[in-house]
Image (spheres, rainbow, N blue to C red):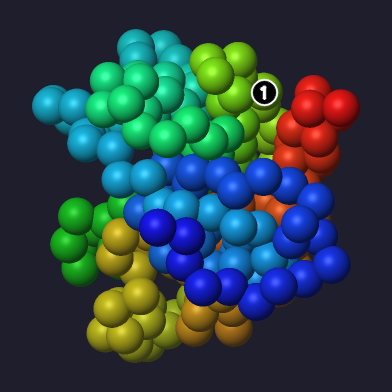
Amino acid sequence: MVDDFKETPISNKFPIIYLASESPRRHQLLKHIGIRHEILRVPKPEGEDEPMLENERPEDYVIRTAYEKSDLAWDYVLNDKLYYRPILTADTCVMMDGYVLGKPKDEIDAAQILLKLSGKMHQVHTAVVINVRGDRTLAVSRTNVYFKRLSMDDVSKYIESGEPFGKAGAYGIQGMASIFIEKIEGSYTGVMGLPLFETYQLLCGLRLKAS
């Protein structure tokens, strides 16, 4: 079922799509620009959630994971004989010094991650894939994010807010963590989890294929 959304000048330019993600931020970003979409809840495969391969670079990991999500979603549509729509998938990776900073397991893990980010620059890569009947098209957003130096009080109060949990890198740029960020170089919405410029370009490609 397509959720209610605020119509914008681009709403009718594109077909209704599936968003194969349960991220409320990606859902809200699509709604913000008026992209008509339906949430596709794809069952997760058994085993470790989005594991990295041995010696895999973080830059390659985020692309591979976005492609794998796309393939799983397309197989789900086929196997369950769902109504066909183009499928949008995305994956976001927070990285520093060649290592991926994932979602914190607990408060101690969240504090350790935030202290790693403190006073330094890290990168956020978000890979976006549009799948049209198995034909996949990729775009990648790369953003440098600069954190101020955090005090232990900053860290403890932020953890107390509950925001770090469920978020890669233990923070959300759209929330309280915005007061920690001195500047970014790249895409704000990419750090949120869905770069709207790149997403719009992929959607424009749908129109070209249909014409």
Q: Secondary structure at mark 1?
A: strand
Dividing the picture into quadrants, the one containing residue 59 is top right
Name the residue rendered at 42%, 35% in the picture. 83
Crowdedness of circle 1 by 10 Å Cα count: few (<14), some, many (20+)? some
Dividing the picture into quadrants, the one containing residue 125 is top right
Look at the picture and state if 160 lies above or below 205.
below
- Quadrant housing the C terminus: top right
Q: Looking at this view, is 38 or 162 the one in front?
A: 38
- Left or right of 200, for residue 138: left
Q: Position of residue 34 (x, y in %)?
A: 68, 66
Dividing the picture into quadrants, the one containing residue 162 is bottom left
Q: Point out the residue furthest to the top here.
A: 54
Residue 73 in view: yes
Look at the picture and state if 156 lies above or below 136.
below
Kind of residue indicated by mark 1: Thr
Name the residue rendered at 20%, 68% in the picture. 107
Name the residue rendered at 19%, 27% in the picture. 45
Q: Looking at this view, is 176 or 156 the one in front?
A: 176
Q: Position of residue 24 (x, y in %)?
A: 42, 65
Q: Looking at this view, is 152 or 140 the one in front?
A: 140
Name the residue rendered at 35%, 68% in the picture. 164
Q: Position of residue 89 (x, y in %)?
A: 50, 38
Look at the picture and state if 169 lies above or below 5.
above
Residue named by callout 1: 137
Q: Position of residue 6 (x, y in %)?
A: 65, 77
Residue 99 in view: no
- Quadrant housing the N terminus: bottom left
- Left or right of 23, for residue 107: left
Q: Point out the residue furthest to the left here.
A: 46
Look at the picture and state if 81 lies above or below 123.
above
